[in-house]
């Protein structure tokens, strides 16, 4: 024992270095998995923070044309909405990982929007080679998410909001009326025989709409474009979302 102690003392520095190396090796082996998990968590957090809103959620959609042979007449929107809500329910274990579901109703394609005659502007009324096209979008609380330039939020079924650049394109203002001729075949609401005429209740500022927010969900409905020509063909103006 005394001989062993004397030997360790004689090689004390080498022994100390060996103990330190062993300690570092053990500490590294223990900390490695912890560092790896922390690195993965940091990478995941950064990826989620930089991802588009639409990449962090899942979407369930339905349309009046998706009911097999039931095409004439198509099911009412309330039935489609109810079916989507029922069939999009998640298992309880997964449901808690997501925010509450939100509902957006919109036309399946852009529709013609025409101004009804009104007092012409000083430089004369606008004429359209092809009627401007816009998507009708309905979502509860949408008016609170835009900045109104004039007018007020829709209060009736036949009220709508236009963006400032869409209103300029149509040469209309709050209080004017527009027509959506493609709604002519729609079944009118009780007491409302004309389902194609809407009143512009207000005008919102397009540049302030945060399409990347959780509310608008990376919406592509706010992509105004003026009329253009392409290969000799005139393309109609594309309006911002028509909020109803």
Image: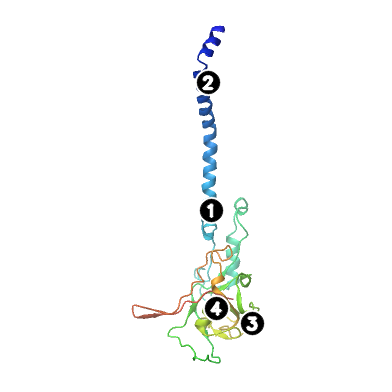
Q: Answer above or below: position of 118 versus 109.
A: below
Residue 166 visible (yes or no) = yes
Q: Answer above or below: position of 166 versus 51.
A: below
Tell whether label 4 touches label 2 (CB within 8 Å). no
**SS for tag 3?**
loop
The residue where tag 3 is placed is 190
Res. 5 image quadrant:
top right
Q: CA distance from mark 3 to mark 1?
A: 47 Å
Q: CA distance from mark 2 to mark 4?
A: 78 Å
Neighbourhood count class around disc 3 (C-alpha, 10 Å): few under 14, some 14–19, many 20 upward: few
What percent of the width, then of the height, locates residue 224? 48, 74
The residue where tag 2 is placed is 16
The residue where tag 4 is placed is 164
Res. 86 image quadrant:
bottom right
Residue 140 visible (yes or no) = no
Neighbourhood count class around disc 2 (C-alpha, 10 Å): few under 14, some 14–19, many 20 upward: few
């Amino acid at each position: 024992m005394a001989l062993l102690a004397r030997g360790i003392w004689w090689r004390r520095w080498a022994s100390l270095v060996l103990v330190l190396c062993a300690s570092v090796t053990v500490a590294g082996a223990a900390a490695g998995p912890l560092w790896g998990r922390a690195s993965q968590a940091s990478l995941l957090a950064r990826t989620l923070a930089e991802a588009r809103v639409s990449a962090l959620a899942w979407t369930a959609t339905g349309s009046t044309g998706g009911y097999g042979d039931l095409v004439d007449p198509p099911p009412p929107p309330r039935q489609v909405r109810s079916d989507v809500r029922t069939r999009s329910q998640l298992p309880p274990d997964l449901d808690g990982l997501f925010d509450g579901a939100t509902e957006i109703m919109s036309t399946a394609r852009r529709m013609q929007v025409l101004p009804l005659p009104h007092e012409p502007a000083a430089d004369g009324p606008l004429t359209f080679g092809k009627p401007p096209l816009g998507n009708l979008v309905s979502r509860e609380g949408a008016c609170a998410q835009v900045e109104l330039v004039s007018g007020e939020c829709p209060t009736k079924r036949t009220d709508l909001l236009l963006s400032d650049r869409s209103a300029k394109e149509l040469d209309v203002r709050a209080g004017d009326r527009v027509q959506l001729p493609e709604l002519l075949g729609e079944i009118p609401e009780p007491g409302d025989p004309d389902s194609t005429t809407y009143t512009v209740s207000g005008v919102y500022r397009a540049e302030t709409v945060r399409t990347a927010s959780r509310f608008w969900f990376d919406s592509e409905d706010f992509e105004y474009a003026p009329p253009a020509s392409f290969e000799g063909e005139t393309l109609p103006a594309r309006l911002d979302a028509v909020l109803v």
